[in-house]
Amino acid sequence: MPTTDNEHKPQGPVRVGLIADAATGDALLAAADACLMLQPLGLAGTAAPGNLADVPRFDDPRQLLSQPGLEAVLLAASTRQDLELAALAAERGLHVWRPPPLAANFAAATEMVTQAKQSPTVHRVASWWEYVLDHVWHELDWPTDFAPVYSDLRAAAPGPPADARQARAGQAAGGALAQAAYALLEALVALRGLPDLVVGAAARFRKGASGGPRETEDAAAAILHYAGGGHAVVTAAWDLPPFEQQLVHHSPTATVMLTADEVRLERVDRPTPERRPLPGDYLADELMRFAEVLRSGARERATLPLERHLAVSALLETIYLAARTGHPESPRKLYQVQGWPEPR
């Protein structure tokens, strides 16, 4: 691998390139521009907004990855393109930040995690659960015996056009379930682990602006059965209002609700719910976390979420498999097939 400035622990803002498509580029560019610990050196895949008009734009992302002085790259296009560009970036000694999912399927996800752990560069996959955990989760006054027995996950959002990468099976890891519901799925897996069995269903029924249907699903639903008798219900949809992000965990002693804005705890022994708003902007928080990891050298902090993301990948693939077969399926079989240790 070529020698880069990354080996000398430079100080000051992290010099980054940004590669994103039109659907996600504006939010990422705004967050990167607002982060004082990042210095954008180039863009690819999306037009620069006014406040970044002087940042060079490259038609070919590979040209951007070869620019002198670059330390890291922020990716937000499609799952497939992000994975391919992340591999090229690592070959050039560049650190990588990108959103989940890890890959299009569990086998590719395990390969990605193996390479990320072996690489001397950082491969950070954003974690919404880590954001919740760090900011508000430990502030709540939990009952000592809190253990969810039933969970209800509901995610609905506007869907992409039929010709967008997020709507194409060869580019995305899935549709409404893998995209609109991903953050809540990560939170579900973090607290309850993987289920023993999954029953799933998925459907395509919406036509995009061009008149054609999306290749990825418009709606999905699943019933998750856990060891010991616990259950969870998961529903995700594009273009079916009300648009919401909500995960509720019920236990005999308390109920907790996670949304995009807050975490609310209701204990059976107290009349008033305890509410904790989520601070600031999740994307800005993620980019700041990435920059701090690079400047502090705390590489393990960046890779900690990878096993959790791997579990979400297993859950996604199992729901899609159950939807195709019409039979209950187990995510643990995927770990056995790949020879990967099951998460605890």
Image (spheres, helix red, strand yellow):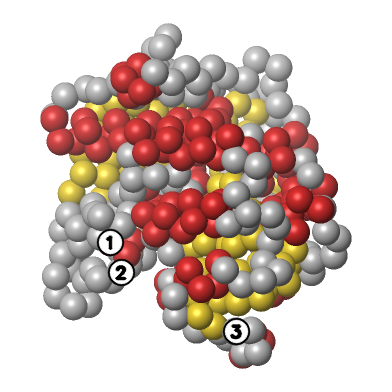
Kind of residue sitting beneath label 3: Pro
Q: Residues within 10 Å of mark 2 (few under 14, many from 20)?
A: some
Residue displayed at 63% across by 34% down = 304
Residue that extends furthest to the right in the rendered view of this protein? 11
Q: Give the mark nearest the N terminus, 1 or 3.
A: 3
Q: Residues within 10 Å of mark 1 (few under 14, many from 20)?
A: many
- Percent x, y of residue 7: 76, 50
Instruction: Identify the residue shown where x is 65% and y is 15%.
Output: 145
Label 1, label 3: how far apart the Cα atoms are: 29 Å
Q: Pointers 1 and 3 in contact (CB under 8 A)?
A: no
| Amino acid beneath label 1 | Ala
Residue 64, position as x, y percentages in the image:
55, 72
Asked if residue 75 shows in the view, the reply is yes
2 or 3: tag closer to the N-terminus: 3
Could you say which quadrant of the image residue 51 lies in? bottom right
Observer-nearest of 99 and 236: 99
Type of the residue with mark 2: Ala
Q: Is residue 12 above or below residue 195?
A: below
Q: Nearer the viewer, mark 1 or mark 3?
A: 3
Query: Which type of secondary structure does the marked residue at label 1 adopt?
Result: helix
Residue extending farthest front: 2
In the foreground, 254 or 72: 72
* Residue at position x 54%, y 52% in the image: 91
Identify the mark at residue 164; answer none if there is no mark: 2
The answer to whether the residue labelled 2 contacts the one labelled 1, judged by CB atoms less than 8 Å apart, is yes
Q: Which residue is mark 3?
A: 56
Disc number placed over residue 167 in the picture, else none = 1
Residue 292, numbered label? none
Q: Residue at x 60, y 49 (%)?
A: 1
Res. 233 in view = no
